[in-house]
Amino acid sequence: MLTKTQPDEIQNFLSDASYLKGGNASYVVFPETAGEAANVLAEATRTQTPITISGAGTGTVAGRVPLGGIVIASDKLNHIKSVSREHAGGTAVAEAGVRLIDLQRAVDAEGLLYPPDPTERSCFIGGNIATNASGARTFKYGPTRKYVERLQIALAAGEVIDVRRGELHADANAVIRIPLPSGRAIEAKLPSYQMPHVRKHASGYYIKPGMDLIDLFIGSEGTLGVIIEAELKLPIRHLVGKTHFEIQEHRAPVHLPEEDAAEEVHAGRTGAPGCTQLARQSRRAARRCRTGDGGRWPPG
C-alpha cells in the first residue's frame, strides 16, 4: 500500500475547494483493497489516531481538510467492476475513487443513465454517496440516495460489511442492529429528530421510522465508515430531441426618432404585440423626464 509522508507529496491532500487553510496530517495512505483500508482503520482506532477520508477534493465545506492524524485517500480505489443492462434498467459496481464522469461515460455506452449530476464531474463516487450529492437533475430524478443499492464499508474497528438495500431496518424502538463478520454485532439507537420534508437536504444523519440501514451511511460524510465500493441502480437512458423551425422576414432597416419608434411599436408595425404596453409606458416616462415633472424608470 502506497504511503506518502513528505510535505510536498501530501500538500494536495490537505485542502479542498473550500480553500480553508491550516490542514495538516502526518501522512497519507492509498489503500487499493477493502482489507488495506480496514487495517489502517483498525490501527488508527487502537492508537486513537484521527482519520480523515479524502475524495477528489471538490467539496466546498472543508470536509476533507485534515486537522492532524492521517489521511486515507481513495484515489487507488478507482475501478468500475461491472456495468450490466437488463430489460428495465441496469446496475453498475464501482469503487469509491471512480470519477463521476468516467462512470457516466461507461453507463452511457450501455444505453443507461446515472442521474445524480453535481456541478463538478471530476468528483469521486464515494464522495457523492458520503454527501448524498445532488445537482440540477435532482428535481426530476432525486438525489444520490435513490440510486444506491449496496455498499461495501470499512468500519473503524477494522471490519468490512456489505449493506444491501432492503435487508436490514430499524425496529419499532428505533434501534438498528448491524451484524459483523466476526460474529459480533453493533446496536445503535437512532436519534428522534424529524427530517425536513424536502427533496434534498444535508441536515444530519438520515433518520426515519423503520429506515433502511443503508440510508444511515449515505450522506454520513464518512463519520460512520469508509465507503469502499457501491452497487448503483441505473435507469434506461431515453433520447430526447427537440426540433424547431425559424421563420424570418427580411426587411430593410428603418431608423426612426425615439418617439416615432415608440409609436411604431404601439401601432404593431415593428416589434412583438407584447411590447405595446411597455412602449407606451416608456414613451410617457421619457416625456415626463424631458418636461421635468418627475418621471421615473422603470414605469409603474
Image (cartoon, grey):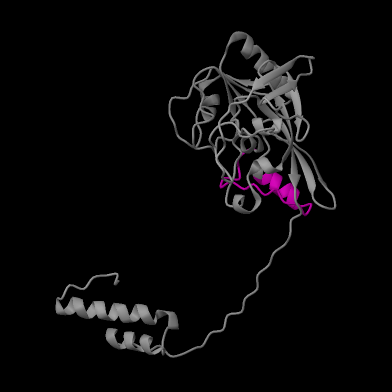
**In the image, is 194 to the left or to the right of 268?**
right
Work out whether residue 180 or residue 39 is closer to the camera in this orientation and state it. Answer: 180
Q: Is residue 225 visible?
A: yes
Which SS does the magenta portion mostly show? loop
As drawn, 276 above or below 138: below
**Range shown magenta:** 101-124
- For residue 289: magenta? no
Quadrant into which the N terminus falls: top right
Q: Does the magenta segment cover residue 108?
A: yes
Q: Residue furthest top?
A: 47
Instruction: Give percent across and percent down for residue 236.
Output: 76, 54
Give the residue displayed 61% in from the left and 49% down from the top.
Answer: 138
Kindly identify the residue that appears in the image at 67 percent across and 25 percent down: 173
Residue 77 in view in this figure: no
- The number of callouts visible is 0
Q: Residue at x 79, y 18 (%)?
A: 181
- Could you say which is closer to the camera, residue 115 or residue 170? 170
Where's residue 206, x and y in %? 61, 34
Looking at the image, residue 131 lies above or below residue 111: above
Q: Is residue 37 left or right of residue 5?
A: right
